[in-house]
Image: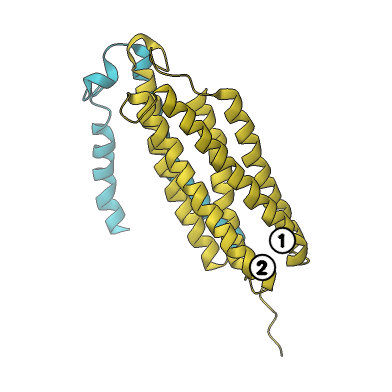
Chain colours: A cyan, B yellow
Amino acid sequence: MRSLNFRAPFLFVAASASLIPGAAWACPACMVGDPKTAATYFGMTVVMSALPILLVCGLGYWLWRRHS
Amino acid sequence: MTRPLPDSRKRLPNSVLAMIIFVVAEIMFFAALMSAHTIARATVLGGVWPPAGQPRLPVERTAFNTAILLLSGALLFMANRRARTSYDKARPYVAGAIATGIAFVLLQGMEWVALLREGLTMQSGTHGAFFYLIVGAHALHAVVAIAVLTAIYFPMRRGTLSPSTFAATQVFWYFVVLLWPVIYLRVYL
């Protein structure tokens, strides 16, 4: 419980900090120019971020259901 | 008091779990290739794909090849159903899956030869580079999977094949079969 009390403010500050920037224009090739290109980059970023999580979680859930 | 036998439906053999984990890694490998291909396609100058001056891919012939590969997967699925009673009943279906798999690879090879003659090479541009990389990586997996299917055919004939080896091989072949329509939709269309 003590460690949770310590972590909660830290997590709150970290989560709040993520709301500060409106957008991070880190890659001009991704976001400047053709909106279709920006949408493609965004879509592929979402797919490549979500796919491993979905695969690992899906496998874990399937194994859990199988053995529970 | 005798212990009850473990429920075979619930036990997942280590070989099958290892193959599933391997397939998950392979899915990420192909997802990365297709992600790069999608971005290259979206950012091409003029917005036309394939780029001007590059050969068009044979969509209709490859649709036929896709049907052959899907038939191969269906045959292996039927082999699995027959294998529950006897390997003797499953064997012809495994042989059919191997034959249709070989037919798919040969027809793809013929397609490659035709495209090379038309001037589509790894060096001819991003279109050719992505085509040979993605389709070639899949063909490599198909060849390995056919070799594994052939390797399990003989112990199956002798009746010495373990069910877990058969199951792990099926996982790999289903991956090769089900990945292809995704590649076809993303690369050819």
Q: Residue tagged by mark 1?
A: B91
x, y (%) of residue B101?
60, 46
| Mark number, residue B156 | 2
Element carrying mark 2: helix
Please tell me which residue is depicted at 58% across the width and 66% down the height of the picture.
B165
x, y (%) of residue B144?
49, 53
> Do discs 2 and 1 share a chain?
yes
Q: How far apart are marks 2 and 1 (CA)?
A: 7 Å
Mark 2 or mark 1: name the one nearer the start of the chain: 1
Residue B140 visible somewhere in the drawing = yes
Left or right: B148 as drawn, with respect to B71:
left
Label 2–label 1 contact, CB within 8 A: yes
Q: How many labels does the image show?
A: 2
Tag 2: residue type?
A: Met
Please tell me which residue is depicted at 36% across the width and 28% down the height of the picture.
B121
- Most extreme residue toward the top is B46
| Mark number, residue B137 | none
Tag 1: residue type?
A: Arg
Disc 2: CA contacts within 10 A as few (<14), some (14-19) or many (>=20): many
Disc 1: CA contacts within 10 A as few (<14), some (14-19) or many (>=20): many
- Most extreme residue toward the bottom is B1
Residue B113 versus residue A59 in the image, above or below: above
Where is the C terminus of chain A found, in terms of image quarters? bottom right
